Image (cartoon, rainbow, N blue to C red):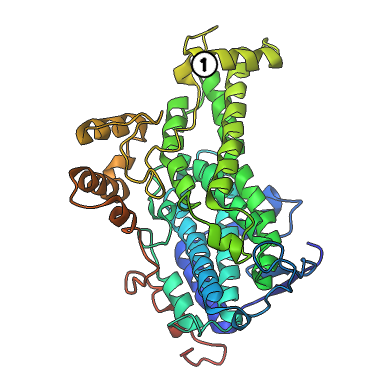
């Protein structure tokens, strides 16, 4: 990459993340051994922090637009530094969290290329987590952080699925379908967030984004390309992944993707402080529009593979008629096609958090009816997990009036240590430095 410099963390921190990788990404050496086979045109993976050197040096949005960007946290107000610190910690949590999720079902891939593509995604997420740790460690955050940089990194490395900051990263994967749909939907949110943070008033953050976006583009490919193949196979009556299975996975992950943008009414502070160019609702709307395009493309592929002699323009027209009327045409049925659930479905943050609505947005009054609806529209294994059970418990409490919607939203996991649950707890402190001394 041109105009990019690379940096490694000080020894004990680099070693701590390497130890973490050995636990949660043990197949990294296998990826490195096979890199030339699967990615012959791409630079080999490196565990380091990248910084783009030719970024704009003036604040691009917000109340301080036109002023020089901040080089240090101590140059910002306490409010700005505190806001930014939470964002960096949350970003780090998601990067490491996604690796833990992918690892659960990585071995279930039925295609070798899909498996190595997912493995590359995991490796690059490790580097992204490393990048965020670099931001935490190279600057002085003590004015807004009750803990040292060492302790902050330690907390992040000790997190497990269920204790990460954002809900999408606290859901166990149930099949390799989750690996792929997660890349297509959740990593696409990541692309939106990284693209917005390219204008960050904090120069080190802005400089970190372009290299991450290059890698994020591959993550989207790793999601959409297998989905296209599965849709084609389903249209021809081949393969193991049905359109119904893909639809249920979309129903599971799309609400979590929307929640990642935050409350639709928020985001003004990010714009005001110069950290992002869009409020939450605007960014979410653009994401929904992009996802609608992806789903439409998948549906057209299904129609054309079902009816290979049908011209492309006619395939689009047939698709539109079937989607609008619900009537089958030339063997293509509405239930065989994909659709994004309504933005009100299965939400945990924002205006529609913990409201009982179906995939069309229609309100459901009875909790038991809502539960049956969810069972019919979500993957079979998902309702058996802790994430769904916690959600349904809070839905019942909100419906019964024993808790408020605001309180239910506040039950999201906080950035907190879960030390002792894995060998990476207290990771920074027990790593031995190059001289054989403890890294205290």
Q: Can residue 428 be seen in this view?
A: yes
Front position in the image: 404 or 440: 404
Question: Which residue: 60% across, 12% down?
Answer: 318
How many badges with numbers are in the image? 1
Answer above or below: position of 239 versus 42.
Answer: above
Q: Quadrant of residue 361?
A: top left
List x then y, in percent, for residue 327: 47, 9
Q: In which quarter of the image is residue 268?
A: bottom right
Answer above or below: position of 303 versus 204.
Answer: above
List x then y, in percent, for residue 307: 61, 12
Q: Which residue lies furthest to the top in this view?
A: 330
Label 1, residues with CA under 10 Å away: few <14, some 14-19, many ≥20: few
List x then y, in percent, for residue 81: 55, 75
Question: Which residue: 70% across, 12% down?
Answer: 311
Q: Name the residue under label 1.
A: 324
Element under label 1?
helix
244 sits to left or right of 398: right
List x then y, in percent, for residue 67: 73, 72
Question: Which residue: 62% across, 23% down?
Answer: 301
């Amino acid at each position: 990459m041109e105009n990019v410099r690379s940096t490694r963390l000080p020894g004990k921190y680099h070693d701590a993340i390497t130890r973490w990788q050995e636990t949660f990404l043990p197949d990294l050496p296998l990826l490195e051994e096979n890199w030339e086979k699967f990615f012959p045109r791409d630079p080999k993976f490196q565990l380091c922090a990248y910084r783009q050197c030719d970024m704009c040096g003036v604040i691009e949005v917000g109340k301080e637009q036109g002023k020089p960007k901040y080089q240090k946290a101590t140059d910002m107000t306490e409010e700005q530094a505190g806001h930014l610190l939470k964002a960096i910690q949350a970003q780090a949590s998601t990067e490491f969290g996604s690796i833990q999720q992918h690892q659960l079902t990585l071995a279930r891939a039925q295609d070798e290329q899909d498996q190595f593509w997912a493995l590359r995604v995991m490796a690059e997420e490790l580097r992204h987590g490393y990048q965020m740790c670099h931001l935490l460690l190279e600057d002085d955050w003590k004015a807004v952080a009750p803990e040292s940089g060492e302790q902050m990194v330690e907390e992040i490395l000790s997190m497990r699925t269920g204790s990460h900051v954002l809900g999408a990263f606290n859901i166990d994967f149930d099949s390799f379908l989750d690996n792929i749909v997660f890349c297509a939907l959740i990593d696409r949110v990541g692309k939106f967030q990284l693209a917005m943070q390219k204008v960050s008033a904090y120069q080190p953050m802005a400089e970190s984004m372009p290299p991450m976006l290059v890698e994020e583009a591959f993550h989207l490919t790793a999601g959409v390309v297998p989905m296209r193949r599965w849709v084609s196979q389903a249209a021809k009556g081949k393969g193991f992944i049905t359109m119904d299975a893909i639809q249920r996975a979309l129903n599971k992950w799309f609400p979590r993707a929307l929640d990642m943008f935050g409350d639709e009414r928020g985001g003004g502070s990010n714009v005001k402080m110069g950290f992002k160019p869009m409020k939450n609702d605007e960014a979410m709307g653009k994401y929904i529009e992009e996802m609608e395009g992806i789903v439409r493309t998948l549906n057209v592929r299904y129609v054309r593979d079902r009816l290979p002699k049908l011209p492309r323009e006619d395939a689009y027209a047939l698709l539109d008629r079937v989607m609008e009327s619900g009537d089958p045409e030339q063997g293509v049925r509405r239930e065989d096609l994909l659709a994004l659930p309504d933005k009100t479905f299965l939400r945990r943050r924002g205006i529609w958090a913990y409201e009982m609505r179906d995939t069309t947005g229609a309100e459901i009054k009875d909790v038991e009816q809502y539960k049956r609806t969810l069972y019919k529209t979500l993957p079979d294994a998902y309702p058996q997990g802790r994430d769904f059970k916690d959600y349904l418990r809070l839905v019942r409490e909100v419906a019964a009036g024993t808790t408020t919607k605001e309180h239910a939203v506040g039950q999201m996991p906080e950035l907190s240590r879960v030390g002792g649950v894995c060998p990476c707890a207290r990771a920074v402190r027990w790593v031995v430095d190059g001289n054989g001394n403890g890294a205290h």
